Amino acid sequence: MKAFLFVFFAWVLVCLLGALPYFFTGYIPNFTDAVFESVSGFTTTGTTVVDSVEAFPKALIFWRAMTHWLGGMGIVVLTVALFPFIGAGAFHLFKAETPGPKVDKITPRLTDTGRILWMLYIILTAAQAVLLVIFGMDWFDAVVHSFSTMATGGFSSRNESIAYYRSPGIEWVCTVFMLLAGCNFTLIYQALRGKPRDALRSSELRTYGAIILVSAILITVSILPQSPSLETALRQAFFSIASILTTTGFFNADYSFWPSQARGVIFFLMFLGGCSGSTAGGVKVIRHFILWKQAGNEMKRIIYPRGVFSIQIDGKPGGKEVVYGVAGFVFLYFVTLFAAALLVSSAEEDIFLSLNISLSALGNIGLGLGKIGPFNAFPAYPAYVKWGLCFAMILGRLELQTVLVIFTRDFWRR
């Protein structure tokens, strides 16, 4: 139980300390805004209160990207990887911070698992940086954008994000690495070890791929009439899907001007999130997969009242406790989402935009529609709204229950 308290307060402390460079340099003179920017960075949300990041010195831009990169794999996971003496308590710390309904250990020793995940994280970050330089970025921008991509964060060194470069090559590189960052890192490790078939057996990975393909078809067909070419439509579609589904928040086009169908797909993807065991936020694909399977079983039960049905995950039957756990999480997610939306609406905001902003914060997405769409800084809401959304961002990053359990009576009785 102490692990949950440790993780929550560690994240709060780190976010507060992370605000100091913004505040003391005077580039974000309001402390609430500085904390908001820091929380957005460490939770890999990517929402920013900064109108012109290009006015920042390079050291501060690098710090913004570093908050993403550290928060992406997780500060506590880094601690577990570096300090083996934590012992048995390491698993509870790891579980409290790892996104998704299950914790995959690559090796029997959790400290070794943490180190492997961090090494993979570093290698992928370096590989993307090299490719971005090959396609025309300078080294500083390449490192900054690689930090943000692999963390699925979205902070950029340019006001126009990836759209600034007007480079199809850079956009495709970012698309591929965003989608990789949204995958379960354990599956990537298995594939790199020469076991791609084991990775492809994953029900979540197959569902993730299907969502990407179907969404790409719908958006491409929708925006093709207003695009200069099929390649442009495909590139913008895949990039936007990767950015929203993996909760990264980069943009290469202003999808606010896309047809309603395309914007509808974007809004739908905000409810999904990436895979478990990735740096992505959101509900996670595996939870939607489990609820979809269970919904099918409930319809079968109407036809066959005496039948016994179970869900299949990766070819293995999943128990009722898995379904109950997922259902409980999703219920809490939407209750929290609507509570946050009510908070935002108290600042005289319309309910759809309030929901959109809350979804962006809780899902660690950073982007949305309307006032929080591409090319827009975060609106100037009262301080209490920003503090509430900071809490929502941390809740989303730590998978809700890790934090909310602290506020229950049973937690303190035990």
Image (tube, rainbow, N blue to C red):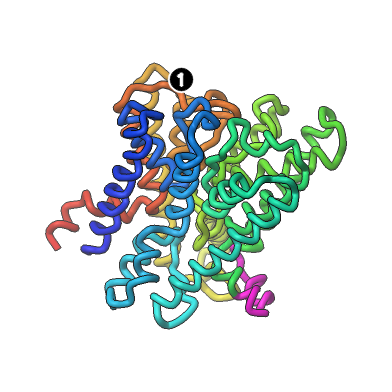
- Mark 1 element type: loop
**Residue 1 drawn in magenta:** no
Residue most toward the left?
Answer: 413
**Which of these two is toward me, 264 or 402?**
402
- Looking at numbered disc 1 in the image, what kind of residue is underneath it? Asp
Residue 131 placement (x, y as % from top left): 70, 55
**Residue 199 drawn in magenta:** yes
**Which of these two is toward me, 232 or 359?**
232
Residue 73 placement (x, y as % from top left): 46, 59
Residue 142 placement (x, y as % from top left): 62, 49
**Which of these two is toward me, 394 or 400?**
394
Asked if residue 348 can be seen in this view, the reply is: yes
Residue corresponding to mark 1: 350
Count the labels in the image: 1
- Magenta portion: prevailing SS class: helix
Q: Residues within 10 Å of mark 1 (few under 14, many from 20)?
A: few
Q: Which residues are magenta?
A: 190-204
Residue most toward the bottom?
Answer: 108
Specify the quadrant of the image occupied by residue 259.
top right
Residue 175 versus residue 116 in the image, above or below = above
Residue 353 versus residue 262 in the image, above or below = above
